[in-house]
Image (tube, coloured by chain):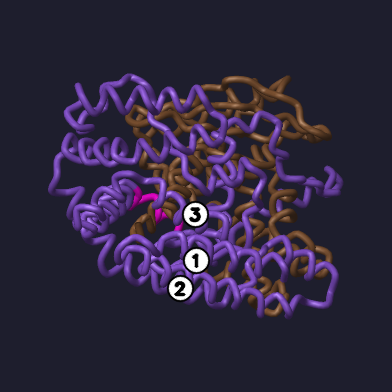
Amino acid sequence: MTFMIIRRKILTSAFLLALITSLSGVAISASASAKATNPTEFIADLGDKAIRTLADTSVGDASRRMKFRILFLEGFDVKSLSRYAIGRYWRKASKDQRGEYQRLFTDFIVNTYANRFGQYSGEKLDVTGERAVKGKDTIVQSQIVRPKGAPVRVDWRVRLRKSGFKVIDIVVEGVSMAITQREEFSSVIRRHGGKIDGLISELKRKTK
Amino acid sequence: MRYTFGVIKLFEVFAYSGQPKSGNGNKLLRLSRILAVLAASSLVACASLPEDPEARAEAVALNDPAEPLNRSVFEFNRGVDTLILRPVSEAYRQTLPQAGQDMVRNFLNNLKSPVVFANDLMQGEVDRAGETFGRFIFNTTIGVGGLFDIAGIEHHSEDFGQTLATWGASEGPYLVLPLIGPSPVRDTVGLVADYYLDPVAHYFDNVDRGNLNWVRAGARAIDTRSRNIETLDDIERSAIDYYATIRSLYRQRRKDEIMNGQNDGTVPMPEISLETEDDDLDEKYTLLKTE
């Protein structure tokens, strides 16, 4: 029984594939700026464009990275995400620190996911429904259908901003990207004596 | 404090109930003692909650009082994984054809059916218990001892940690156990209980083939690890704090498993209450600049 081990550790992990697929998915969406009129349409549209772009292998690495960056910034509410990720430490940060942190946050996400574009192998995004949650957000429910293996459950938390719909969280098989990031980042800050500079230097190291 | 004490008591109960049986009770007793020590060490750590109310609230929510110890064990597990489990799993995946790997998994899943069935029942999930039962009958007979999954009903897993959760037990302090990995107090209690619930484990012990239990656990570890090589590599590569990431993932996945994936609005989504409005929208585009 001892060796039930890593099974548990691993249960947690199946999510990442989905996270990557979905994120890269979203990323590509944006630029074609026909504005969606409801959250479901927004996500379906996003998934569509994402897959079209993913399937296109003619793009070079550098331009793909830039494209991803633009799309991420347009499809996601990056400012909210980055603030949420450091929680209470945001208030303590100076203006300069905030600016630098947000830029690094974007670099970090782009770095983490951009390399994985080449790995598209026929996944499809099926939007299955939506429901309202407390406040002004909508959860768009979807599935990533894979050529091999069970479909992956993905919930998109969408909020309406002046500039249109924005994704503020992705929940893959019950795992929230926002919560995971927040717990990781605040742990890093704590271990650097509560200083946001600690996180900033770690992010720099990671995004070099 | 009282809570931790209660946990130690609980382990004692488990330990002593196991004693009448052969050598296996002793093993469990030892395990329980180790766990009791772990629980006690978390008790000590409890004494040093930070003063600042916000930091304090954060520490309470984190519920990882033995974090320094947990981190050491985590690193130890990582070492074992790098040196043994990962290479073995990779070799396994490369050598055995997919059909063979599926058979191994089917067989292991089938072997665990009685435990899943018992937990289904204890959670009052009668339909799911029926599914587990039906699968077991079909796959054990027509499926040649469980090698083939021909029942046509999707497999699901349950364990006593989840059962305790549905009974209202909270997760308890986070623990990382040697070789076992993330296993908060509730899930650790669940592990011990599942062992007792498992007729297959008892059978192996009774015929003096307790080593088969280890073979089985090893096979399960390799099976699972071999299917997650790239995923875990990715998580590790992108993590700044791998320990904190795994802790977060473990808890969220468990919560989802406990709900059987049915969190349709019953589980509160994260409160993302950011006062950020579109005020500084233009600023966003400065983020487009890379350095």
CA gap, disc 1 to disc 3? 27 Å
Q: Is residue A94 visible?
A: yes
SS state under label 1: strand
Q: What chain is colored purple? A: B
Q: Please say whether residue B232 is one of the residues in the magenta stretch.
A: yes
Q: Over which residues does the magenta segment extend?
A: B228-235
In terms of sequence position, does the residue under pointer 2 or pointer 1 come before the other?
Answer: 2
What amino acid is found at the position of numbered circle 2 in the picture?
Answer: Val
CA gap, disc 3 to disc 2? 27 Å
Residue at (66, 75) in percent of width and height: B43
Numbered label attached to residue B73: 2
Q: 10 Å neighbourhood of mark 1: few (<14), some, or many (≥20)? A: many
Q: Are marks 2 and 1 in contact (CB under 8 Å)?
A: yes
Which image quadrant for residue B50?
Answer: bottom right
B30 and B220: which is toward the camera? B30
Q: Which residue is mark 3?
A: A112
In the rendered image, the quadrant that contains the C terminus of chain B is: bottom right
Q: 10 Å neighbourhood of mark 2: few (<14), some, or many (≥20)? A: many
Chain label for disc 3: A
Q: Which residue is mark 1?
A: B176
Residue B124 on image: x %, y % = 57, 30
What amino acid is found at the position of numbered circle 1 in the picture?
Answer: Val
Residue A26 on image: x %, y % = 56, 36
Is B238 left, or right, of A96 in this rendering?
left
Chain label for disc 2: B
